[in-house]
Amino acid sequence: MNILQPIGHYVLKFFKSVGALVLFTFTALSHCLRPPFYPRAILRQMIEIGYFSLPVVGLTTIFAGMVLALQSYTGFSRFSAEGAIANVVIISITRELGPVLAGLMVTGRIGASMAAELGTMRVTEQVDALTTLSTNPFKYLIAPRLIAGILMLPLLVLVGDIIGVLGGYLVAVYQLGFNASNYIQSSWEAMVAMDVVSGLVKATVFGFIISLMGCYHGYTSKGGAQGVGKATTDSVVSASILILCFNFILTVLFFEK
Amino acid sequence: MTDTPKIKIRDLHKAFGPKVVLDGLDLDVMPGESVVIIGGSGTGKSVTLKCTLGLMQPDSGTIEVDGENVVGLNSRDRERVNHKFSMLFQSAALFDSLPVWENVAFGPIADKTVNRKQGKELAIEKLAQVGMPPEVGDLFPSELSGGMQKRVGLARAIAGDPEIIFFDEPTTGLDPIMADVINDLIVKITKEVGATGLSITHDMASARKIADRIAMLYQGKIIWQGPAATIDECDNEYVQQFINGRADGPIEMAVRK
């Protein structure tokens, strides 16, 4: 009895949390589709998520592309298969590394900031103030962040893909001595539309997950500074795990034969 | 004054787990009247306001605004009813991502009753009403002192020409002179706007100044109410203990047990 009690407590708590998250998600999505919309708030979030995340995503993907080219060369040179480096870089970056790395970096930058901002607004009664000003907090705070996340992550990943491939090119040509035009041609031939599209679809899902987790944990936070800190941590941890989980699910859906 | 109360609360109950906060609260606020609810911390003053605004759902009871029961309204009807309300929060609850003028004109801009240019002019006009110069409009809330934030909060509360204004601990955290300035402003502004006022405070100087009628909340019920001028003569020992700030008396603080 004493053993079952805590197990039951945690099981009930888990289902309560899942139920709350599902309700939050449906409410948020319904507000994304119904007017009024707040274009200025959406634009502000798009700039915050898209434009200001460019440096961190660019730096992450360029180094990932460079390391990928270097490591592939080390491995493939044992089998005299150095020519496959362009293929490896293109496939790895567009299918996996671009969306996953961008997703995780944006989680750290944006998911945490969303949770901290909304959490602070919650504990300082700014969310209540919105309601007293006849403005639905879901419409003004949550919907713009979700819309911006869904729209901007694919664009960020597209830019990240290009920069990542460029990183591979720089190492291959300037460090490993590959012929530039041959490398570009190999890269071009290795590029498959489906790889890029699958990466962008993943990015859309990741953008939704990042914004949703940031908004959910921030909006539902309580208990002052400690609560805001916990909301920030929870948003980053949950979004990171969900990104890796959904990356696997989407990879299976796209590429399993 | 008409006979229909602007706000009519009947048999309101609210508990958080085993802790009963409101235990059958009854209160009427007549049109144009200024009612102040006094009572110690944790007696349910803020919960009463939050239930009336729809920020919290009571367990049972009714809250009528202009004869319409507002408990359990859907979000659209709640937004309609909340157009009648505005609130000055204890912490002012200004949106710290927006400049002061946008804070003041937030409601009218969100309602689309004014555009942004007109909103700025409206904000400057309302800031002047609370004795603040136009330059303050371009500052951010974090650049203002506590008293200035309260005044901006007051300007925001009257910007939408509300029918009912709630004041949540309007003088908490202010020095006595600034507290008196805020009290004077509350009296002047509510008269100018012609609004009905419902305030909660434990500052007796503030209650005496802004109230037409004072109601004392204790253990979730109104235990005394009457004209502000008569509170010193009332023979209720709970009220006498509270207004004289005595540690000894029928009100027992949890810390003394």
Image (cartoon, coloured by chain):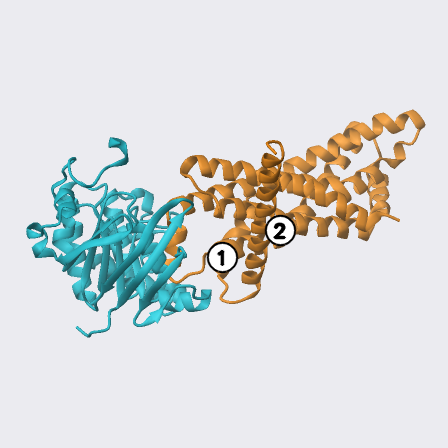
Chain colours: A orange, B cyan
**Left or right side of B161 for A31:** right
Position in image of residue A238 (x %, y %): 61, 40
User: Would you say A86 lies left or right of B161 here?
Assistant: right
Give the residue type at disc 2.
Answer: Phe
Q: Position of residue A73 (x, y in %)?
A: 84, 28
The N terminus of chain A is located in which quarter? top right
Q: Nearer the viewer, mark 2 or mark 1?
A: 1
> Which numbered circle lies on residue A138?
1
Residue, x 11% and y 42% (percent of image)?
B244
Q: Quadrant of residue B7?
A: bottom left
Residue B14's place in the image compared with A14, above or below, is below
Circle 2 crowding by C-alpha within 10 Å: few under 14, some 14–19, many from 20: many
Subunit bearing disc 1: A
Q: Residue at x 17, y 57 (%)?
A: B225
Q: Between residue A34 and residue A17, name the one nearer to us.
A: A17
Q: Is residue A55 visible?
A: no
Of residues B242 and A132, the one nearer the viewer is B242
Task: Find the distance from the CA under tag 2 to the CA under tag 1.
Answer: 15 Å
Q: Is residue A235 left or right of residue B37?
A: right
Q: Up-down: is A3 above or below B243?
A: above
Circle on res. A208: 2
How crowded pointer 1 is (Cα within 10 Å; few <14, some 14-19, many 20+) is rated as many
Considering depth in this image, is B7 or A257 the residue closer to the camera?
Answer: B7
Task: Indicate left or right for A238 with B156 as reference.
Answer: right
Q: Do residues under tags 2 and 1 come within 8 Å of each other at their CB atoms?
A: no
- For the point 42% across and 36% down, the residue is A225
Residue at disc 2, secondary structure? helix
Q: Which residue: 59% across, 38% down?
A: A10
Which element carries disc 1, helix, strand or loop?
Answer: helix
Identity, as a three-letter code, of the amino acid under mark 1 = Phe
